[in-house]
Amino acid sequence: MPLQVDVTSIIAALIVIVLFVLIILISGLRVLREYERGVIFRLGKVLPKEKGPGIIFIIPFIDRMVKVDLREDYFDVPHQRCITKDNAPVDIDAIIYHKVISPIDSVIKVANWRLAAVGIAQTTLRSVVGDINLDQVLAEREKINTVLQEKLDEVTARWGVKVTGVEIREILPPTSVLDAMIRQMEAERIRRAIVTEANGKRESAILIAEGEKQAMITKAEAKRRALSIRAEGSKQAMILRAEGYAQALERIVSVAKTVDEKTMALQYIETLNKIGDKNARKYVIPSEALEALKQIGRGIPRATNPGKQEDSAK
């Protein structure tokens, strides 16, 4: 009977030990997802390589695991007052995108890298904004994002964290500056409208002037053609008149050849009579006229004295 008690006790003790070992072993199992890594501290000292993903085992009561998420994440940089280079106050907030690239460094080199990154982002943002004017802050948001990302990445790289992007979410200048910006935008819109209207009028004037020019060219061309046709007609008329004169002269010459000298002399005297002044007291008779008279005199029989004629008859 005492022997049976001892065997039962031993079996029970073994079962308890096995269960205890199983519990310890089970408690040492960990499951890490694809985007998770485990940084293991063994008796306070970090192991040189992180664990995961999948099922890993840590020694209970000896190892301690810190999970690190490798997915890209973001945090907000709260609104803060920044002073620009031209002493204009602006309220700015931003979003910082980041991801862990070294799980061990992100755990052992900084106590809370997210909180530290927020502080660095605020300080860097004030520094970047302080180096530029208000107009540049409002107009060059992408440039601010790039500069802020580069400076943040230089600081967070030693923590095993990569800054993948920075976005300025909101920029709030003072009310007076906002009013001035609104007035400036209205003035710019008015200016653009005036420029557009002026360009339209200019194009319209150009088209009208071009049309008038083409009309003037067409009129001038038509006038030139009309003058050319008229000149051609005048030329043809003059040619016809000249031909008529030539034919008339030929006719006169041919007729004159058949007329004797006496007839020509009479015609000459008649012409002189027409061109002479009837009221003039003096006449200028050319020598040719005298010759003509002589020719006429030779052709007229001389009148004899009647008395002499009778004597000769007797």
Image (tube, helix red, strand yellow):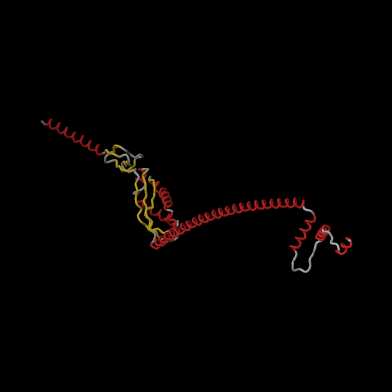
Residue 39's quadrant in the figure? Answer: top left
User: Closest to the observer: 207 or 217?
Assistant: 217
Residue drawn at x 35%, y 56% is: 79
User: Closest to the observer: 188 or 264?
Assistant: 264
> What quarter of the picture does the N terminus occupy?
top left
278 shown above or below 105 = below
Of all residues shown, which one is farthest toward the left? 1
User: Closest to the observer: 265 or 314?
Assistant: 314
Rendering coords of residue 301 (x, y %): 83, 59
Rendering coords of residue 26 (x, y %): 24, 37
95 shown above or below 302 = above
Residue 18's quadrant in the figure? Answer: top left
Number of marks drawn: 0
> What quarter of the picture does the C terminus occupy?
bottom right
Q: Is residue 99 left or right of residue 287?
A: left
Residue 61's quadrant in the figure? Answer: top left
Rendering coords of residue 35 (x, y %): 32, 41
Rendering coords of residue 152 (x, y %): 40, 50
Of all residues shown, which one is farthest toward the front? 314
Q: Is residue 250 left or right of residue 237?
A: right
